[in-house]
Amino acid sequence: MTSQRALAEEYAARIEGFGPISVHRYFGGASLRADGVQFGFVMKGVLYLKADEVSRGAFERHGCAPFSYAGASGQVTVAAYYEAPGEALDDPEGLSGWAADALRAARSVPQRKRGAS
């Protein structure tokens, strides 16, 4: 079985046009970052990409579900990240396009300063 990190590194290697993409530990999975900005992660073998108001509809039209997990009080849905479309995973050009949109969405979120309360 492929580790979450190995799978994230495989996706990172297939994404073109960004320059280097780094892979970091992320809870029980692995995150993908470009220039220090997280735009996706792999959790339980699934690639999730950052979504926003501009891109969310495209994920939904492709039948992609938002990230969710079982919390203490029930299922928690995180609409900021959606599954990558299955057809894009085997197509470096398609995957790169989805990843570029995810990076755009991630960069549009104001970054919190470290140590700020």
Image (cartoon, helix red, strand yellow):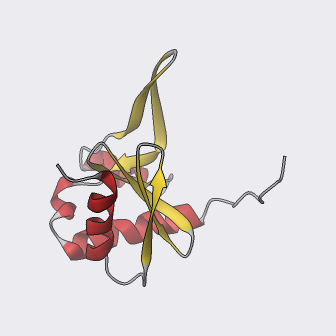
Q: Nearer the viewer, residue 12 or 98?
A: 12
Q: Nearer the viewer, residue 28 or 90?
A: 28
For the point 20% across and 62% down, the residue is 89
List the single residue furthest toward the top: 73
For the point 54% across and 62% down, the residue is 106
Q: Is residue 84 above or below residue 104?
A: above
Number of numbered discs present?
0
Q: Position of residue 80 (x, y in %)?
A: 49, 47
In the picture, measured across the screen, residue 53 lies left or right of residue 14, that is right
Q: Position of residue 19 (x, y in %)?
A: 42, 84
Q: Position of residue 97 (x, y in %)?
A: 32, 72
Q: Position of residue 76 (x, y in %)?
A: 47, 27
Q: Is residue 7 above or below residue 13?
A: above
Q: Is residue 54 above or below residue 98?
A: above
For the point 57% across and 70% down, the residue is 36
Q: Nearer the viewer, residue 26 or 66?
A: 26
Q: Which quadrant of the structure image shows residue 87?
A: bottom left
In the picture, measured across the screen, residue 48 lies left or right of residue 45, that is right
